[in-house]
Amino acid sequence: MRNVPPEMLRYQWKDVIRVWNSKKRRDCEQVGTSSRQKQKFTHTAGSKSFAYVAEAEELSSGQKVERLQLFDITHRKKDESPMTSEAKEIMEKLKDKKAEYEAIASSDRSVHLDDIDNWIITEVLGPKRYGQVLFQGSFVNPTQYFGSNSQQYMPSGS
């Protein structure tokens, strides 16, 4: 029991060492490492939630941050270049789809502009796991974000 930090009691340090050396801890670490390797692309939000980043951007710009814009904000470096080539490809696909859907919306009055971003994200990135909304953080569910009576629109043939 050497190297006990001065701010810890000896029995606390023993517990910490026991937890660090446990099989459960090693298994959790292995799952985390595996998940990190499967990650498609990284973001620049760090430990901040996407909701926090969106709120901060809204306060600084004075305008509501849409989901596509939030993807763009959280996947660019400080020099404004995309984080990775994959992120760049996705940004281009999102931009192209946005133009395509806006053209449809301009000729079809049944299209709700608010729903376009949601369909584009689902189409380009695929659906999020059940009960979650991409780019809105861990604790936002579809009913909270879209409302209980939301009619998500996707043009036929898409």
Image: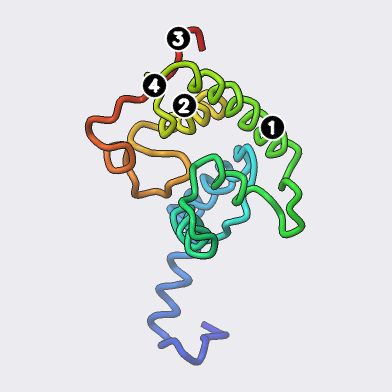
Disc 4 and disc 2 in contact, CB within 8 angstroms: yes
Q: Compared with residue 141, is residue 13 higher up or lower down, i.e. above or below? A: below
- Secondary structure of residue under mark 2: helix
Dot placed on the residue nearer the N-terminal end, 2 or 3:
2
Dot placed on the residue nearer the N-terminal end, 1 or 2:
1
Dot placed on the residue nearer the N-terminal end, 3 or 1:
1
Residue 56 at x, y = what percent? 49, 63
Residue 58 at x, y = what percent? 48, 58
Q: Compared with residue 20, is residue 116 higher up or lower down, i.e. above or below? A: above
Extreme-left residue of the structure: 148
Label 3 belongs to which residue? 156
- Secondary structure of residue under mark 3: loop
Residue 68 at x, y = what percent? 54, 40
Left or right of 22, for residue 93: right
Q: Residues within 10 Å of mark 1 (few under 14, many from 20)?
A: few
Q: CA distance from mark 4 to mark 2?
A: 7 Å
Looking at the picture, tell me which residue is in the foreground, 150 or 63. 63
Disc 3 and disc 1 in contact, CB within 8 angstroms: no
Q: Residue at (43%, 46%) from the top-left corner?
A: 136
Q: CA distance from mark 2 to mark 3?
A: 12 Å
What is the quadrant of residue 103 in the picture? top right
What is the quadrant of residue 129 in the picture? top left
Label 1 belongs to which residue? 92
Label 2 belongs to which residue? 119
